[in-house]
């Protein structure tokens, strides 16, 4: 049966309700609700041991839940394991390929009945020149891109990636990011487990933050930043001027849209407020027709700040279990 009949684009690709899993009586996934929509890149982020990997292993049929309902493309990952495997691409672990296996051989080995032309995929992910290289001769970034090729070769509807860029240097991470952006542009649904919050911010349409097997919050990266990351801060030295002029400058800064607090000490001004205050302080500096202060410094709230705030919340506050 074609997968189109199993899950239409309007239906979620992943639908999890009340998922619970314990190891040795310790609950590590606790009544989790999770929805992954068609064509989105969803990031699972959170503390170590939050249950992220356990959750994606259950989605792949590698583990069985204790209770709760799990549907991947409308299928039960354990009962319909073969069909789920046909339509879900998963990333291998580094130990997953023999050292001497060549890149093109690995692609042939993984290609099923519905496979895409492997050479085209290798070309697309910048591995065409490495077709004859043994796996052991690939750099970290090349290995990860090969894992992506192998996860994609059978035209999956859903790709599950668990810490894909862990341990890569910045250039290799960017290569892998760009490969994931290509997948997104093609409409492939991606579920990404990551500790790299700049990665989640750059790649994910939505993120789900987890702790102790439950959902702390979910939304677009921008929504989580707005809800939890606190203030933007702009700091600079105010050019020396007389007391009245300084007081006037501080009053103007206080009146800027988005400013919530202006502090002044030893000629240093700190303006706190919403993200938009950054633009307004910049405009104010330009309009003042004085040289832009060389020590101008901006702290922009990001997903890392948001997650740290969320993880700091006392246990049981705001834990919903749900991320739909
Ligand atoms: P990390 O970010 O550190 O990879 P995670 O969010 O992916 O963590 P899991 O790997 O799902 O979390 O682990 C959740 C909890 O379950 C952890 O406390 C882990 O030690 C425990 N755990 C995982 N696998 C097993 C297992 N096979 N047997 C017993 N406990 C396990």
Image (cartoon, helix red, strand yellow):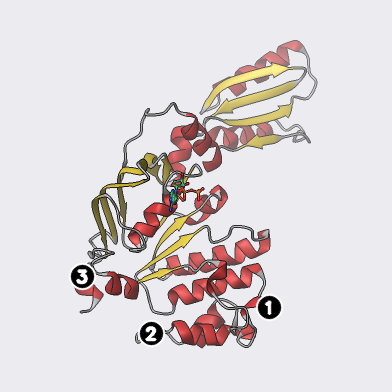
Asked if residue 119 lies left or right of residue 83, the reply is right
The residues bearing labels 1 and 2 have C-alpha atoms spaced at a distance of 25 Å
| Relative depth, front residue between 112 and 4 | 112
Asked if residue 311 lies left or right of residue 245, the reply is left
* Residue 247: % across, % down: 68, 14
**Disc nearer the start of the sequence (3/2):** 3
Q: Quadrant of the N terminus?
A: bottom left
Q: Would you name the residue on which mark 3 appears?
A: 6
Q: Please, which residue is most extreme toward the top here?
A: 243
Residue at horizontal 52 percent and vertical 30 percent from the top = 230
| Relative depth, front residue between 207 and 104 | 104
* Residue 208: % across, % down: 40, 46
Residue at horizontal 78 percent and vertical 25 percent from the top = 239
Q: Would you name the residue on which mark 1 appears?
A: 137
Tell me if mark 3 has few (under 14), some (14-19) or many (20+) residues whose alpha carbon lies within 10 angstroms of its own: few
Asked if residue 159 lies left or right of residue 201, the reply is left
The residues bearing labels 1 and 3 have C-alpha atoms spaced at a distance of 41 Å
Residue 302 visible in the shown view: no
């Amino acid at each position: 049966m074609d997968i189109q009949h199993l899950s239409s684009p309007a239906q979620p690709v992943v639908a999890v309700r009340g998922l619970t899993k314990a190891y040795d009586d310790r609950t590590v996934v606790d009544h989790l609700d999770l929805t992954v929509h068609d064509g989105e890149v969803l990031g699972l982020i959170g503390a170590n041991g939050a249950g992220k990997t356990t959750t994606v292993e259950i989605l792949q049929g590698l583990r069985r839940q204790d209770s709760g309902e799990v549907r991947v493309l409308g299928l039960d990952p354990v009962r319909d394991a073969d069909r789920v495997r046909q339509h879900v691409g998963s990333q291998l672990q580094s130990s997953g390929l023999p050292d001497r296996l060549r890149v093109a051989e690995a692609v042939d080995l993984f290609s099923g009945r519905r496979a895409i032309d492997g050479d085209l995929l290798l070309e697309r992910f910048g591995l065409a020149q490495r077709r004859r290289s043994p796996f052991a001769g690939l750099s970290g970034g090349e290995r990860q891109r090969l894992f992506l090729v192998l996860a994609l070769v059978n035209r999956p509807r859903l790709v599950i990636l668990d810490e894909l860029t862990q341990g890569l240097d910045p250039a290799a991470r960017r290569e892998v990011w760009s490969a994931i952006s290509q997948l997104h542009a093609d409409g492939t649904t991606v579920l990404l487990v990551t500790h790299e919050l700049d990665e989640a911010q750059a790649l994910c349409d939505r993120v789900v933050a987890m702790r102790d097997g439950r959902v702390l919050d979910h939304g677009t990266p921008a929504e989580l930043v707005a809800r939890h990351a606190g203030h933007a801060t702009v700091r600079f030295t105010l050019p020396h001027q007389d007391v009245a002029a300084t007081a006037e400058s501080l009053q103007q800064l206080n009146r800027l849209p988005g400013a919530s607090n202006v502090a002044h000490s030893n000629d240093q001004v700190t303006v706190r407020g919403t993200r938009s205050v950054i633009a307004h302080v910049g405009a104010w500096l330009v309009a003042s027709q004085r040289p832009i202060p060389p020590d101008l410094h901006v702290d922009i709230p990001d997903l890392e700040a948001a997650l740290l705030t969320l993880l700091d919340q006392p246990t049981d506050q705001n834990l919903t279990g749900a991320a739909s």
